[in-house]
Image (cartoon, helix red, strand yellow):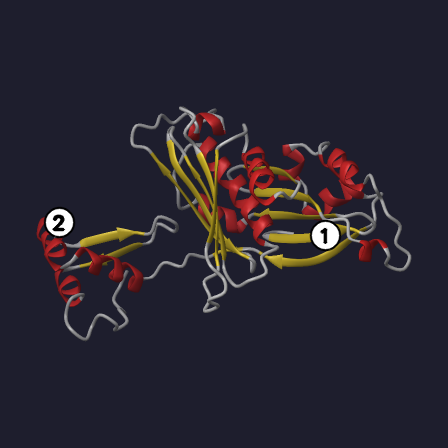
Amino acid sequence: MSDTLVRFHLRDAPVRGGIVSLDRAWLEIVNRHEVPASVRDRLGELSAAAMLLAASLKFDGALILQIHGDGPVALFVVECDARGRFRATVKLREDMAANVDATLAQLVNRNGRGRFVVTLDPRSDDSARRTYQGIVPFAGATVAAALEHYMERSEQVPTRLWLAADGTRATGLLLQQLADDGARRGAPGATRDADGWNRMQRLAETLSNDELLRLDSQDVLHRLFWQESIDALDRRECRFECRCSREKVAAMLRLLGPKEVREIVAEQGRIEVRCEFCNLPYRFDAVDSAGLFVAGLESTPLNGPH
């Protein structure tokens, strides 16, 4: 199942989970960012984790995961929604050494000042929903450990993650312990499995990174839980999608003001802005730049070349 996320739950115990495989969608990210393998793989793991967590969003909006680093990597960012659309980027410091063997802690928490940030952005007209942001100090040796630490500190939902990524694939498995509600236990034919949470964790801990990267998602679930009573909740496709546009870049340039824009054009001949997520260039020559500040054109769509 290429570029697919599947959610499931353990039928007789308060445990839910998800498994995601990003293949072509992950290659869209890889091909747009030239970074050391250690950085690429951590970004892939964060992408898989974000997709798994966003799958349970109950509003029209986005989940944004960020790791702010004080080491060679200044920032990891993954933005996704419950529909399976995502984009990701990473910012390296100029003096970064291309160390392909660096751990996550070495990349982002060299001096102990790394931070993990989770943002829920409703992006709707519902005034009752507001942007939520949770920030915790960076903790853990892996992306999975950092997220588990965040969930423990901020969400108070017992969560386990197993993540893996390389140059061609990013995958992940998530398990969460649900509230033990009586309605579910009282369902016809249901029997309570008090050890379900612990047993599912022990089974998942037998999974290797190589198996996550090599096996199809359905094969992973069968390999781990073939003796369990599991129900699939839903299956959704995942894809890379960037929200950048020429109009948004134009709005950003207007914030600089006409004087600064003219100075940049005079010095460089034109203005070129690249999207940090998809690496697409947006170019504004002298005529385009002057048109940004002509009365009546501010709200007119810009249909010129990128």
- Residue 66 image position (x, y, % from top left): 45, 43
Q: What secondary structure is marked by label 2?
A: helix
C-beta proximity under 8 Å, tags 2 and 1: no
Q: Earlier in the sequence, mark 2 or mark 1?
A: 1
- Residue 63 image position (x, y, % from top left): 50, 52
The residue where tag 1 is placed is 8
- Residue 231 image position (x, y, % from top left): 78, 54
Circle 1 packing at 10 Å, graded few (<14), some (14-19), many (20+), is some
| Left or right for 219, reference 137 | right
Name which residue lies at 91% across and 57% down: 189
How many marks the image carries: the answer is 2
Q: Nearer the viewer, residue 267 or 24?
A: 267
Circle 2 packing at 10 Å, graded few (<14), some (14-19), many (20+), is few
| Left or right for 136, reference 21 | left
Name which residue lies at 26% across and 69% down: 302
| Left or right for 1, reference 225 | left
The residue where tag 2 is placed is 268
In the image, residue 46 above or below residue 302: above
Amino acid type indicated by mark 2: Gln
Amino acid type indicated by mark 1: Phe
Name which residue lies at 16% across and 59% down: 285
In the image, residue 51 above or below residue 130: above
